[in-house]
Image (cartoon, rainbow, N blue to C red):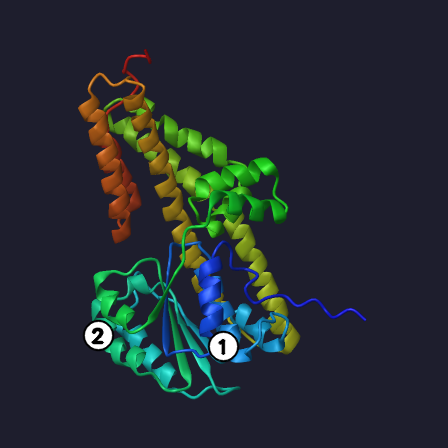
């Protein structure tokens, strides 16, 4: 009789061979805290759940009851902390410290997964340091961050750091093909996603991707120095960005249905609905920012092409445009009013419409 197929806990971790090897070895004799560092969409979140499953079950089998619950984010001994606002506040840190002190519910070990800790307030970092440094013997911390900002350096020094890299374009393309997307959709999404598998999945389901990128690319040729054109252009871009969220919203609606079905099956009320809704809001916010970043990158490419093709009567003004776009990209980190930020940018950009044709 053939043995039943076992699904690895690492099945959803893509393109991170070295990190998986490090964590597999670490699970044999784990320490008190780990720091996973890598860009959004690199599957470090999936790796955190996989590592937690390995820590609690001791075996690489995603089919066990505990592993299934952990990988779904529903195990009572794996507490995942998501930020409630723009940053992780001191109040949230107090809740983390309190939960870390509680005994495990089902086993002899619990795992605290702290998401997006590059957005931790400095005051919160100071309060959390001692708990990260000397947690209860039964608690293991997994801290996730896109990068290590100054306020996280001291905490980082108390953790074993595991680095995650952006996922290669060819790997993302293969994953999308395996998930049933067409070759064309997989290729375009992989190119536009910049190593972010989560974003690539949304883009692959978006039939308007090519048209949207074309509109952004054409913005420099539409500018004419008037505020009316800038306002009209910004409104059009904003409408495109909002429409681009449709595939993500469809996926989120399906997740709500599945959550309700699971809750009904076990007779629960709520069943994590609030947490799911909060996560969906964060996903939509991040998707919007990613769309704007991607579009601005396409705009910068139009200006760079004008320089390379020697179509710029004033190369210095075109170089200034590229710098201004990059400044705007950096400003997005501060959660500004995006429409005003975009209007300010376009008012300051030169038009490519009147440049000489390529030689």
Identify the residue shown where x is 25% and y is 66%. 152
Quarter holding residue 62:
bottom right
Identify the residue shown where x is 48% and y is 73%. 52
The quarter of the picture where the C terminus appears is: top left
User: Label 2 crowding class (10 Å Cα cut-off): few <14, some 14-19, many 20+?
Assistant: some
The quarter of the picture where the N terminus appears is: bottom right
Quarter holding residue 223:
top left
**Between discs 2 and 1, the one toward the N terminus:** 1
Q: Disc 2 vs disc 1: Cβ atoms closer than 8 Å? A: no
Q: Which residue is mark 1?
A: 55
Q: Position of residue 72 (x, y in %)?
A: 55, 68
Depth check, front residue: 156 or 237: 156
Left or right: where does residue 131 sit relative to residue 58? left
Furthest toward the right, the residue is 1
Identify the residue shown where x is 49% and y is 77%. 55
Quarter holding residue 262:
bottom right
User: Label 1 crowding class (10 Å Cα cut-off): few <14, some 14-19, many 20+?
Assistant: many
Left or right: where does residue 89 sit relative to residue 213? left
């Amino acid at each position: 009789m053939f043995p039943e197929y076992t699904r690895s806990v690492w099945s959803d971790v893509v393109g991170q061979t070295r990190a998986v090897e490090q964590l597999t070895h670490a699970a044999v004799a784990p320490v008190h805290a780990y720091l996973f560092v890598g860009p959004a969409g690199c599957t470090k979140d999936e790796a955190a759940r996989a590592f937690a499953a390995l820590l609690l079950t001791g075996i690489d089998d995603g089919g066990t009851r505990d592993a299934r619950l952990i990988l779904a984010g529903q195990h009572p001994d794996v507490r995942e902390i998501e930020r409630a606002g723009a940053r992780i506040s001191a109040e949230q840190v107090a809740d983390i410290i309190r939960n870390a002190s509680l005994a495990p519910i089902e086993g002899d070990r619990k795992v605290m997964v702290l998401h997006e800790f590059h957005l931790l307030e400095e005051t919160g970092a100071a309060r959390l340091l001692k708990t990260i440094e000397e947690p209860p013997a039964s608690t293991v911390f997994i801290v996730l961050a896109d990068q290590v900002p100054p306020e996280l350096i001291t905490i980082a020094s108390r953790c074993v750091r595991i680095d995650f890299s952006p996922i290669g374009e060819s790997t993302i393309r293969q994953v999308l093909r395996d998930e049933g997307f067409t070759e064309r959709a997989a290729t375009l999404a992989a190119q536009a996603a910049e190593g972010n598998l989560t974003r690539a999945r949304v883009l692959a389901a978006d039939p308007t991707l090519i048209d949207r990128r074309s509109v952004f690319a054409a913005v420099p040729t539409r500018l004419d120095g008037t505020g009316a054109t800038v306002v009209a252009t910004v409104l059009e871009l904003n409408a495109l960005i909002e429409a681009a969220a449709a595939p993500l919203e469809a996926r989120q609606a399906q997740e709500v249905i599945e959550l309700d079905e699971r809750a009904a099956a076990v007779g629960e009320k709520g069943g994590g609905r609030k947490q799911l809704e909060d996560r969906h809001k964060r996903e939509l916010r991040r998707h919007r920012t990613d769309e704007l970043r991607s579009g601005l990158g396409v705009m910068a490419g139009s200006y760079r092409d004008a320089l390379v093709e020697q179509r710029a009567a004033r190369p210095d003004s075109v170089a200034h445009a590229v710098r201004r776009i990059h400044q705007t990209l950096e400003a997005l980190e501060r959660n500004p009013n995006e429409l005003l930020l975009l209007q300010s940018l376009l008012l300051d950009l030169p038009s490519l419409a009147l440049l000489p044709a390529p030689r």
